[in-house]
Image (cartoon, helix red, strand yellow):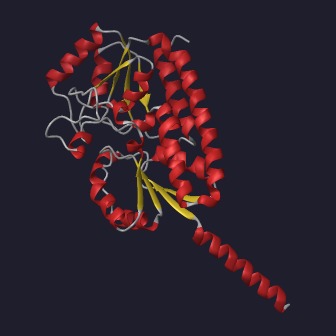
Amino acid sequence: MKKNAALTVIYILFLVAISFASLKVMATINPYYLVLKEIAGERAEVSLLIGPGQNPHIYSPTISDVRRMNEADLIIANGLDLESFMSSAFKDLENRGKTVLFAGTLLPATMLGEDDHDNHENHDELPAGDTDDDHHHSINPHVWLDPLFLSDYIIPGIVETLKEMDPENGYYYSDRAADLSYRLRLFYAEAGRYLDQFRGSIVIVSHPSFSYFFDRFGITLEPVLQGIGDEPSIQDMKRLIDFVKSENVIGIFAEYQQSKRPIDILIRETSVRNGNLDGLGISRVDTVEHFEWNLEEMKRVFGRE
């Protein structure tokens, strides 16, 4: 009896040790949370900081958020000034020895587009007087919405970091990541078969979240809202309405995390088909399903199979 009791105690202590040894990883936004869940499976404890219904551009961490980040071994953030109100929190975490991986920095700088119209062909060569921090303010940060950015750069970078921190599960992470990257490439091929027919067309959106995605297929994205919290003036709206009526605009999309008022005006004043895009994966169960949901909404709006 005593022997059985001793074995039970040892077993419990073993389970407790495993639970404490588990790698704790936090994602700032839902798309990276979905990616991490698929790569890490049950081998790491994955948590989410900013819910998919919230706008990360204007999110400011609470005291409890900072406490949760301090409990994590690894934080996956987007960077590129997406989580602009969290920069001081990230610096403090790094000063405390925490690992913060900025997914946007895993991409070659020359692949990053601009949110404004002051584009520079080579982002490795900053304009005179610009610092890296200044330059990031104009870079479009929505890199997670390009399936090839994810499969070819971001996922490999995340896996390498996980393997460095948890080498015992390295092969496990690599295998699962390879499967996810393969499914993302299949999705990209599927999307191309449909969207290639619309090359040269224009899409109106609330915010430039899907710029990288549409650019892959030669579709121009025209955002209504360039900045955070901006609302177009009456003159801006008149120009947009005239633009939609005169150009080859195949769809108008609102986004769940952005103001819908300007989009409603455009829809009311034009006859262009419209819908909603989801940049952060509200109620989506995995990464590919998030992409597929948006593609299905595009098909519903654009038509022409």
Q: Position of residue 30 (x, y in %)?
A: 46, 46
* 163 is higher (above) or lower (below) than 179: below
The one of 279 and 9 positioned closer to us in this rendering = 9
In percent of the image, x 31 and y 26: which residue is there? 263
In percent of the image, x 27 and y 53: which residue is there? 85
Tell me the quarter of the picture where residue 176 sits.
top right
Q: Position of residue 59 (x, y in %)?
A: 31, 51
In percent of the image, x 40 and y 22: which residue is there? 215
- Extreme residue toward the top, this view: 246
Query: Can the viewer see residue 1?
Result: yes
Image mark count: 0
* 171 is higher (above) or lower (below) than 122: below
Query: Can the viewer see residue 50?
Result: no
Q: Is residue 130 left or right of residue 92?
A: left
The one of 127 and 295 positioned closer to us in this rendering = 127
The one of 265 and 59 positioned closer to us in this rendering = 59
* 174 is higher (above) or lower (below) than 248: below
Q: Is residue 185 left or right of residue 108?
A: right
Which image quadrant: the N terminus?
Answer: bottom right
